[in-house]
Image: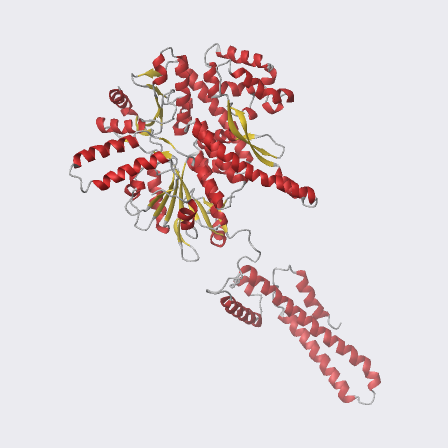
Amino acid sequence: MFIENLVIDFYNVIAKQKVLILVNYDIDAICAARILQTILKYDAISYTLIPVSKISDLISSYKEHINNFKYVILINCGGTIDIVENLEPEENVVFFIADSHRPTDVCNIYSLNDQINEDTLDNEENINNESRVAKRRRLDEQSINKRLWEKNRRRILFEYSQFSYYGRSTSILMFELSWQLRRDNFDLLWWGIIGVVEQFILNKIEILQYLNEVEKISTHIGRLCANNDQVIDNSSQNSVTSSQQSSVSNLKINCEKDLQLALYRHWTVENSLRYTMFTAVGLKLWAIKGEKRLHQLLVEMGLPLAESRQQYYSMDLSLRNEFHNMIEKMSDTRNLTHITYPSFTLLQGFRTKYQAADYVYSLLALLSNNTRSKNLRDCFYEAMDALLRVRKDLLDDGIEKSKKLLMVMFKHVQSALDMKQIMTAGPFYYMVIQEGTINAKYCSNPDCLWLLATFALKAYVTTSRKSKAARLPLIASAPLEDGYCIMLGVPPVTETTPRSFFGKAFEQVAEKTGSVIQADYFDSTAVKLQVADRAKIFDALVVLLS
Amino acid sequence: MLCSNAVGLIKQLERTSDDTVPPYDTDNIRIVLQEMKSLYDENVEIVNSTRDHMEDAMFALKIRHRALKRNKRCLLAYLWNRLERIKEMRWQIGSILPAEMKCNFSPSEEQWLSNYNKSLASYMRTIGPNGGLNLLQNLKPPKSLYVVVRSLVDIGRIELDDGEMIVLKKDAQYMMLRSHCETLIHQGILEHVL
């Protein structure tokens, strides 16, 4: 069942209980978990928090820890699978699922004993669709024409589960819970914002959805920052306490238009322009003429080359103040429309501003940074700690790493285009990242692979002369360890809603070919399979989709 | 010199640091007591024998009496301060003191400690509605009762003080009562995080 009122149906139930929290490895989930942790801390609710990366991981962690718990909260995981069937829980265990993955598994919503509570105020369409299924299910007892009904049911279910996409960010949902409990504060809001911006940056939600969220958030900012202004008023009257309170008022979140340039505040303008997906695609920077085009843009903007190669914060002040206007003026003529988007910046004291997107890139780099010395869970906690204001060193470290990540991605796309590694297979494109490539280790993270694949597809479409190109999706595949590889489908460029049908397609292909595809990721568009089976799967996909 | 042993006892106590109890100095105490006895005897003898020449004996009497009083004061101070230290240790270390500390106690001090423990326990049982309150926990008010900890090693299932079972797996994060996890943090099993 869906939860209507977060406080009554969710929070009051878990209050004074022990809860088990399972968190997925993604930025939205980490932010949501942080917010939830803060809320639970106020009420001294003891919990155990475990990061889980895959469905198998979820099942094993659940079985290890469940003995002591009656209440389980799943953050950004488990919504798309049938919980009762997979976890085989005891009768008295209650699940709360806060998952932005869609579609939500039907069995979770209409579980017989209401054991599972969907922690989402979901969009209408979704619920209506569901209730139709349920109604039909109820009617069937009297109905004679059972076969017709079943066919219909299967069709509706198929339509419902055909596309996998993302719903509302979980972290903003958690922030709203904190708001309803009157526990919201500055940090919680910022973490909520990061969750929303992550969905936008990684192209998980539509722009309209994003703008909607931005509007809602800006009212929260108004409320929370208004309190800050009051503090300043008080302190001016009461000069004794002013020194203490001024530290509070130095924190500020601004909602403003910002550039879609990755990390430009912490990088040089030239590099940022070069390695951001948006500008790289717009200016076709991977081509030989790309560099010239970049320089030409800088010239027309009136930004000296020497300045553009400096760190942004040490650029000339007048240039820095003019930078936004200059680039916005150029954007229309340069195939870079919509270079600005409404975003948020965090200002702490007199240091450099952080854009919400900077946090996202930094966390992404920290999360995908698993090397031999660091396992996945270390990365998870590093990313979690980087959210704290006192651990800025981790955040800055992440920013450095994400610069490297963006550079690697750009170079990979460049070489993939040069070497013609993106190939057509009739109804879709595919790109295989070979094992042994230096960059392969970055790509084992689904989020990074998703970003890379989107980048590659966009780049390919702009270079391709065929008009059909824009309508085709791309399948990317990257090696994992032990002879396995990850495969992931990206929707075509023309698709306005970022939803992908590959989850279902992979499933059907697996049925037909009899090869083992492990849908082990919470995002159903990504699957894990044996490298040996890859070619077979591609062939079967061609047959299925054409 | 009169009273030198008694002052010596005090000095001996003063020389040791505040959180230890030096060995109970039976010899010195016996010497002081003997001195007091002899002083008293001499006084009694003078008072009994020389009833007429009271004036002359008065000074000697007064000096001896002062010395007696001083010895008494020093002895009491010695014993009192030792008890204070033992009490302090009881609150800091717990009801069962290590044997190497206990061997410095006199038998009566040990007796006192066990009595003290008994009355403290029975007092703590009477506070609050259910089963009393452990006054020894949180001598200073803690910032929060619960802390967030991360497990550093795989321990598996363990039982906490209050009988609850918990599974400690590497890289899981827990919010636990501070009192439960303090020892585990000392042992390096858990790590406190912000």
**Residue B112's x, y, as percent?**
56, 71
**Residue B95's x, y, as percent?**
52, 64
**Residue B127's x, y, as percent?**
51, 66
**The N terminus of chain B: image quadrant:** bottom right
How many badges with numbers are in the image?
Answer: 0
Tell me how the rendering is colored.
secondary structure
The residue positioned farthest toward the left in the image shown: A144
Report the front residue among A405 and B2. Answer: A405
Q: Does residue A80 appear anywhere in the picture?
A: no
Indicate left or right for B74 with A116 as reference: right
Report the front residue among A216 and A307. Answer: A216
Indicate left or right for A396 with A150 as reference: right
| Residue appearing at x 38%, y 12% in the figure | A464
Hey, which quadrant is residue A250 in on the image? top right
Above or below, A108 relative to B161: above
| Residue appearing at x 51%, y 11% in the figure | A293
Report the front residue among A65 and A353. Answer: A353
**Residue A399's x, y, as percent?**
52, 29
Q: Does residue A423 appear anywhere in the picture?
A: yes
Above or below, A114 relative to A344: below
